[in-house]
Amino acid sequence: MQTILGAGGAIGTQLAKELTAYTKDIKLVSRNPKKVNETDELFSCDLTDKAKVLEAVEGSTIVYLTAGFPYKLKTWKEAWPLVMQNTIDACKVHGSKLVFIDNIYMYDPSKLSFMTEDTPINPSSKKGKVREQIARMILDEVKAGNLNALIARSADFYGPAINNSLLLEVVFKNLQKGKKANWFCSTDKLHSFTYTPDAAKATAMLGNDDKAYNQVWHLPTAANPLTGKEWIEAFAKEMNVKPKYMVVGKTMIQILGLFNSIMKEFVEMLYQYDRDYVFDSSKFEKAYGFKPTSYLDGIKEVVKAG
């Protein structure tokens, strides 16, 4: 049995499809799980409930933690350590391997111009400190020999028919509505994005390879990222619309934050847009002979999916 905790998100749904190459026994766990494959087993669970997580993980050889929480610091600080501890404890009790889908919030902001698995951990944001905390919880258990686990890190997501991609919200969907695309801070900076089908496929590959465990991996992400302006122009060209856009600076985000809680929470993360953000996945690509989907091909698939 391979189990996805937090099934149904940008990675969880696609991962469920990819796991069929390795097993027919897949369990999807969330508050309201829905089948992706006909043979999926569904288990309703609040991941903050230790007893229910323990029950959900029972019988699992591999557990994938792909959960996401509302973009609120208070929720992150309360829920993430609890969910991570519940997951680790359940995996230890049942002898399950753990695969955790992570992001790059814990990396040193001065090192974003070329991020590898060895990039220094030195978060400047409060959300980054939460991500550092939960990653260390896994790595400490691995170091102590109590857990077989791996961390699979991704750049910001984009992909067909997903609802939690900032790139799609501020560029694709705005252009789709005949509005100006938005970008933050500077359109001249490079910005990597990880294509969700690639990320899901790679996560399944890592989870099912014993040699991949007890280390950190960057999920496959195309090299030579586009600048903000180039992202907007590429989407506009594929959509056959004019590449109109507006740059939103920190002051404007702070003002919007007075009326919009997500914008208020986003202010501390703006540093990711005022400098180059380049994510390197050559470790995975070399180990598995994997070529990430090009940005232009990814954009075509996003537009095609609508």
Image (tube, rainbow, N blue to C red):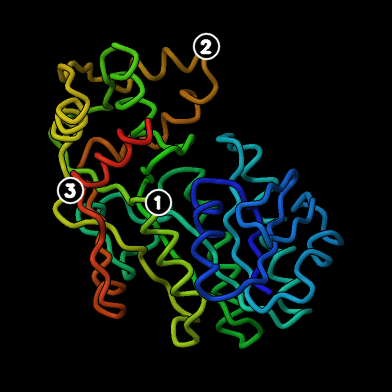
Q: Residues within 10 Å of mark 1 (few under 14, many from 20)?
A: many
For mark 2, what is the residue?
259
Looking at this view, is 106 or 282 the one in front?
A: 282
User: How far apart are the two marked residues, 1 and 2, measured between alpha carbons?
Assistant: 31 Å
Drawn side of residue 143 relative to residue 198, left or right: right
User: How far apart are the two marked residues, 1 and 3, measured between alpha carbons?
Assistant: 16 Å
Q: Secondary structure at mark 2?
A: loop
Q: Amino acid at mark 3?
A: Pro
User: How far apart are the two marked residues, 2 and 3, measured between alpha carbons?
Assistant: 33 Å
Q: Nearer the viewer, mark 1 or mark 2?
A: 1
Q: Nearer the viewer, mark 2 or mark 3?
A: 3
For mark 3, what is the residue?
225
Q: Residue at x 27, y 20 (%)?
A: 181
Which residue appears farthest toward the front when viewing the image? Answer: 38
Q: Residues within 10 Å of mark 3 (few under 14, many from 20)?
A: many
Q: Is residue 174 above or below residue 118?
A: above
